[in-house]
Image (cartoon, rainbow, N blue to C red):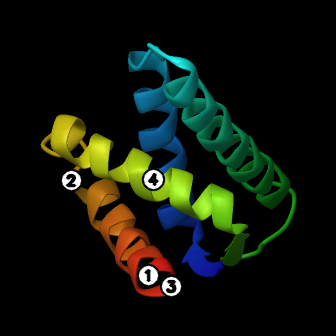
Amino acid sequence: MNFKLNRTQLEGIHYLLTAALRMHQPTNMADSLLTELVDGVNDRIRAKIKKAEFNNKTGFSLKLNSKEAKALYCWFNQIEQSMGEHYQYECIITRQIVNDIDKEYA
């Protein structure tokens, strides 16, 4: 899957994922695997943001394989329930991504 995002959206997702990853400690092997996949995607997002500091790029493409997309789908559903009131803008962006993933893999 490929998502087109602007810099503000990409940074918002990064802030939300970073906060959620810091707050959430995996409790079992499946949760640990999910956390690793999401952390890997967050690392790629962070690299895109750092690279953007050196150029004037306004649009970004976030490419996810099926495992990463499904991991983000699960993760974003958890985040929205627990962090939605503190990260309203970011949750709006993630809801759009979740809807696209749901259409693709439903």
State the separation of the CA atoms marked 3 and 2: 25 Å
Which amino acid lies under the numbered mark 1 shown in the image of this protein?
Answer: Asp
State the separation of the CA atoms marked 1 and 3: 6 Å
State the separation of the CA atoms marked 2 and 1: 19 Å
Horizontal relation, residue 28 to residue 106: left or right: right
Image: 100 above or below 64: below
Q: Which mark is residue 88?
A: 2
* Circle 4 residues within 10 Å: few <14, some 14–19, many ≥20: some
List x then y, in percent, for residue 18: 51, 32
* Secondary structure category for the residue under label 4: helix
Give the label, 1 or 3, closer to the camera.
3
Which residue is tagged 3? 104
Which residue is tagged 4? 12
List x then y, in percent, for residue 102: 39, 77
Which amino acid lies under the numbered mark 3 shown in the image of this protein?
Answer: Glu
Residues at badges 3 and 2 in contact (C-beta under 8 Å)? no
